[in-house]
Amino acid sequence: MDHFLYQNGELFAEDVSVAEIAKVVKTPFYLYSTATLLRHFNLFDEALAWGPHLVCYAMKAASNQAILKTLAEAGAGMDVVSGGEYARAIAAGVPGDKIVFSGVGKTHEEIKAALTGGIRQFNVESEPEMRVISEVAVSLGVVAPITIRVNPDVDAKTHAKIATGKSENKFGIPIAKARAVYAEAAALPGIKIVGIDVHIGSQLTELEPFEKAYAKVADLTETLRADGHTIERLDLGGGLGIPYTRSNEAPPLPMEYGQMIQRSLGHLGCEIEIEPGRLIAGNAGILVSSVIYLKNGEGRDFLILDAAMNDLIRPAMYEAHHDIIAVEEPIAGVDQQPYDIVGPVCETGDTFAKQRNLPPLTAGDLVAFRSAGAYGAVMSSEYNSRPLIPEVLVKDDHYAVIRARPTIDEMINRDTIPSWL
Ligand SMILES: *Cc1c(COP(=O)(O)O)cnc(C)c1O
């Protein structure tokens, strides 16, 4: 459920007209709903209310400072995957003891920054990384709390580019090696083991792969405890999928996910951490764009938009589907017609959708891409020298630009000319 609905014949974000924002901000832009962000965070928080837990928002999904602050004020922790994200979380007011640090290649500098600024735990991805974390901690005179990310070798049944839990993926240590790696960890001077971490992929639409992975984590918890390790936290990663089309069968709800976690792991008495990204931000954001031209091609009509693959890369990168709707509500009974919906970038991959039914549209009309809040703005670039587009946040009946569009000059002036030119 989200807060982008038609009211009085036009699309609203909460209580603000999308067309009104477009007049001021100019298209294209990302538009987020505070109420939807908070609703999704609270659904997870309630789904885990049966025991001690922390919902750590995977901020790589959408990391604008205003979004982070909105969630942090509601009590969210953060899952960060780089020193830049760590600094963003701290800048948004998230205390270090609510930040977990994931990612396969944490550098010496990133580890040092997190140990200095405060960190809840590192989710270790390899033995060499674990040794470096220990060395850095010893050099700072502290002890680093860690979990080790295990790779449970389960099929997440999602797009190959976002599946992470098979043994052929680069993530975590093979679960079969876990006892040996935990034994090494216990012997390192700068490390304190606090639990186990697992994350098997993104946009999962069934509970079964999670359930398989968590059963393995439950067994491993008992094995490691028998070996004498303290396992008091289980970080279960993110990955719960969202409905990208309204016709699709809906993925499991956070409440069902939380109940499955309780069934699988509740008996172990651990604090549960989860790292949802997409489900919190995905349907809390839309991309608003204008039609530049209606081009009548051979046997098909193209809607050429002012948004392009550099603004929203998911269709080009993951063959992802986004529902695209007219901002002006279609009049009941008006015939829809099929369009190919494309951006102006010089690549055939810059195609958002083919043969998509929409009411008749023409130059100047506004459209909205639904479910664009996660892995949208954060993956955008200035390819074709198209400046990064603004981000806007709505709350009730007001809105604010939370990242302004750079001017063309600002974009150019980030480059510097060497002395010999
Ligand atoms: C990407 C990622 C997440 C978030 O995944 P979503 O599908 O957005 O929920 C959580 N944890 C880790 C380690 C990740 O890499």
Image: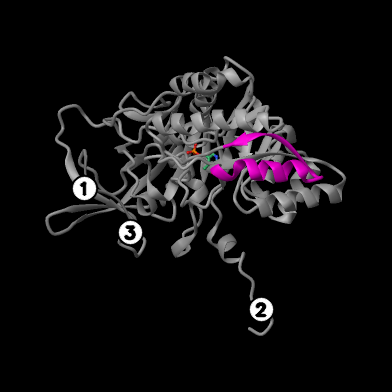
Residue at the spot 41% in from the left edge and 39% down from the top edge: 156
- Magenta extent: 176-197
Q: Amino acid at mark 3?
A: Gly
Which of the 4 quarters of the picture holds residue 271?
Answer: top right
Q: Position of residue 232 (x, y in %)?
A: 68, 27
Which of the 4 quarters of the picture holds residue 309?
Answer: bottom left
Marks 3 and 2, Cα distance to the nearest angstrom?
A: 34 Å
Judged left or right of residue 403, residue 374 is left
Q: Position of residue 124 (x, y in %)?
A: 65, 45
Mark seen at residue 25: none
Which corner quadrant holds the N terminus?
A: top left
Q: Earlier in the sequence, mark 1 or mark 2?
A: 1
Mark seen at residue 418: 2
Judged left or right of residue 92, residue 364 is left
Q: Amino acid at mark 2?
A: Pro
Give the residue furthest to the top: 50
Q: Position of residue 76 (x, y in %)?
A: 62, 28
Q: Which residue is mark 1?
A: 339
Task: Give the camera-side residue of 253 and 398.
Answer: 253
Whether the magenta-drawn stretch holds residue 412 is answered as: no
